[in-house]
Every structure is written in C-alpha cells, then in structure tokens.
Image (spheres, rainbow, N blue to C red):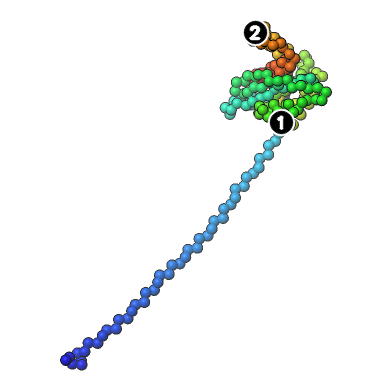
Amino acid sequence: MLPESAAIQPTAVQPTATQPATVQPTAVRPTAIQPATVEPTTAQPTAIHSAAAGPTAARGTASGVPQVVLAFDFGHRRIGVACGDTISRTAAPLVAVPAGAGGVRWEMIDALLREWQPALIVVGLPYNVDGSDSTMTSAAREFATALERRCRLQVVLVDERYSSREAEARLKSARAAGLRRRRVAKADVDAAAACVILERWFAGEA
C-alpha cells in the first residue's frame, strides 16, 4: 500500500464554454427607379408654298428614300391626278376625279391619298398668258388650301399654263404612233395635264 501522502489526487478539468460567433446582418437599401419622362412631339402643319419660293429639298433624295408626290390639275368639271416619286423624278397619270354642282368629290380624293400615301402635294395654278390671275386661279387656290387642311401635308403651287395643251398633244401623238389605241377623252387630258404639272415641279419650274 502507498502511504497517504503519496495518494494521487484527481485533476478537475473545467469545461471551456464555446461562444457562438455573432453575425451582424447587412442592411440593403432598395434603389428607387425613376421613370423616364417622354416629351410629346407636336406636329405643326406646313403652310402652302408657291413653286417659285417653295423649298426644293423635297425634290432631292438626301435621305435615299423615295417620296411619293401627287399632283392635281384643278377644274370645275374634273380634277386630273398624277403620281410620281423623288427618286425617278418621273410622273404618270392616274385618274380624273369628277366634280360638278356638288363641288369636289372629296371622298374620292381622300381614297387616293390613303392609297398612295404621298409626302407632298402639287397643285397647278391656272394663270392667264400674261401671268395675271385668271377666273380659275382663286378657285384653284381655295382647292389647294382645303387639300392642305384635309391631308396636313405641304402643298406646292405650280404654274400650269399650257399644261392641258401639252398633255393633249402627247396623247394624240401616242395614238398616232400606235402606242395608244382608244380615243383621247377629256378625262385622259386632265390626268395627263396633272402629269405635266408634276414633271414641271420635278424640273424646278416656277
């Protein structure tokens, strides 16, 4: 036996307390999204111009995109209509819209505008030989003003003197050459006169 002084005393082990790590949450602040503000664009109608003072940019092809142009030969019985574009600078007769005691057949003209979607309108002004206003000049101006109001497009006025005579001569020449079979009617002359008017505008004539 060991003596009492040699007795082994047990060592008390103190448990170590483990402290859990504290994670501090990070506050995320939401970002407010500002809506984009779109400023509305107001389209202003373009006033009627004469061919002498009117802009020539529409005759060109700066944008490279062809623009359709409609031309009108105003008359109390019929209104000749022709169509062309700013790329080829050529014109072709379309139709003669009948007119009469009831005035302009606007429903037919509106249908042509919807069909062809022109970028510009040309209207012939019937002057006297000496360049003074004729009895038809004021009526043609009123038609051009009404047309500009309805379609909200630029309307250019072109001197149309001798256009009907030139148109009739062309049609008769084509018939004599065998290029045209049927006889030349007045409605054909009116549409061809609008074609002459448009060609003059393409050429820059006043």
Marking on residue 47: none
Residue at the far bottom in the pictured view? 4
Residue 51 shows in this picture: no
For the N terminus, the quadrant is bottom left
Residue 59 in the image: state x and y as whole percent.
Answer: 63, 24
In what element is the residue under mark 2?
A: loop
- Earlier in the chain: of badge 2 and badge 1, it is 1
Residue 200 in the image: state x and y as whole percent: 68, 18
Residue occupying image coordinates x 83% and y 23%: 101
Q: Amino acid at mark 1?
A: Cys
Q: Quadrant of residue 18?
A: bottom left
Determine which residue is flagged by label 1.
151
Q: Which residue is mark 2?
A: 178
Residue at 69% x, 26% y: name it: 112
Q: On the picture, is 103 further left or further right than 21?
A: right
Residue sitting at x 64%, y 25%: 68
Quarter holding the C terminus is top right
Q: Residues within 10 Å of mark 1 (few under 14, many from 20)?
A: some
Q: Position of residue 127 (x, y in %)?
A: 77, 18
Are the two marked residues, 2 and 1, in contact with CB atoms closer than 8 angstroms? no
Query: From where the camera sits, is residue 100 visible?
Result: yes
The correct choice, above or below, for 79 with respect to 1 in the image is: above
Three-letter amino acid code of the residue under disc 2 = Gly
Measuring from the top left, give residue 142's x and y in whole percent.
Answer: 78, 26
